Amino acid sequence: LMDPSSGIRQKKTKMSWQSYVDDQLIATGHVQKAAIIGLDGSLWATSAGFNLPAPELSAIAGAASNPASILGGGLNIEGQKYMVLRAEDPIIYVRKGSDGACISKTGQCILIGWYGEKVQAGQCNQAVEKLADYLRENGY
């Protein structure tokens, strides 16, 4: 089913966090790797091949809770340091060369969408922010 107000595809049953990663982020073609983590840095769901070690998850959660803390310092994703382009609650944009990520915090979780050279940053950002808006509107 499609929610007409948001354009988010929904199944009749409540979607799992993994299905949000697979169906709402990866399936768009604008997000090449994705994860949903708790505000405490715990991993809730991830796409295949997206390897985020616990220290990076904790750092991402900390950055999402206090975006100003990473300005000028960068953020590590899969062992690579990314430059912070924007860090304003609830959005963080990071980039390294042609790769980058959009990180968006909701009331209960943090969405991470990563893109490589074949995807434009704005397309990834839009996909991540659309799902984040939907989750916020529905109490998550």
Image: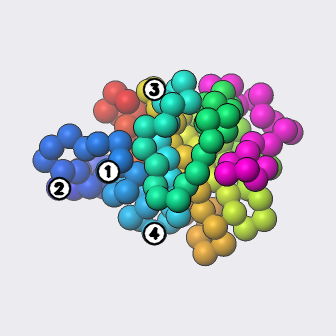
Can you identify the residue that label 3 sits on? 107
- The amino acid beneath tag 4 is Gly
Mark 1–mark 4 Cα distance, whole angstroms, equals: 15 Å
Vertically, is 114 above or below 29?
above
- In this view, the residue in front, 43 or 62, is 43
> Residue 1: which disc?
2
- The disc, 1 or 3, on the residue closer to the chain's N-terminal end is 1
State the image coordinates of residue 109 (x, y, percent, origin top left). Answer: 47, 32
Vertically, is 86 above or below 7?
above
Mark 1–mark 3 Cα distance, whole angstroms, equals: 19 Å
Was residue 72 drawn as part of the magenta stretch in this picture?
A: yes
- The disc, 4 or 3, on the residue closer to the chain's N-terminal end is 4
Mark 1–mark 2 Cα distance, whole angstroms, equals: 14 Å
Residues under numbered marks 2 and 3 in contact, where contact means CB atoms less than 8 Å apart: no
> Residue 19: which disc?
1
Tag 3: Cα neighbours inside 10 Å, few (<14), some, or many (≥20)?
A: some
- Looking at the rendered structure, the secondary structure element under dot 1 is helix
Residues under numbered marks 1 and 3 in contact, where contact means CB atoms less than 8 Å apart: no
Q: Write the residue at 17% across / 55% down.
A: 1
- Give the magenta range: 65-82
- The amino acid beneath tag 1 is Ser
- The amino acid beneath tag 3 is Gly
Q: Write the residue at 67% across / 58% down.
A: 100
Can you identify the residue that label 4 sits on? 29
State the image coordinates of residue 130 (x, y, percent, origin top left). Answer: 43, 49
Q: Which of the 4 image quarters holds residue 121?
A: bottom right
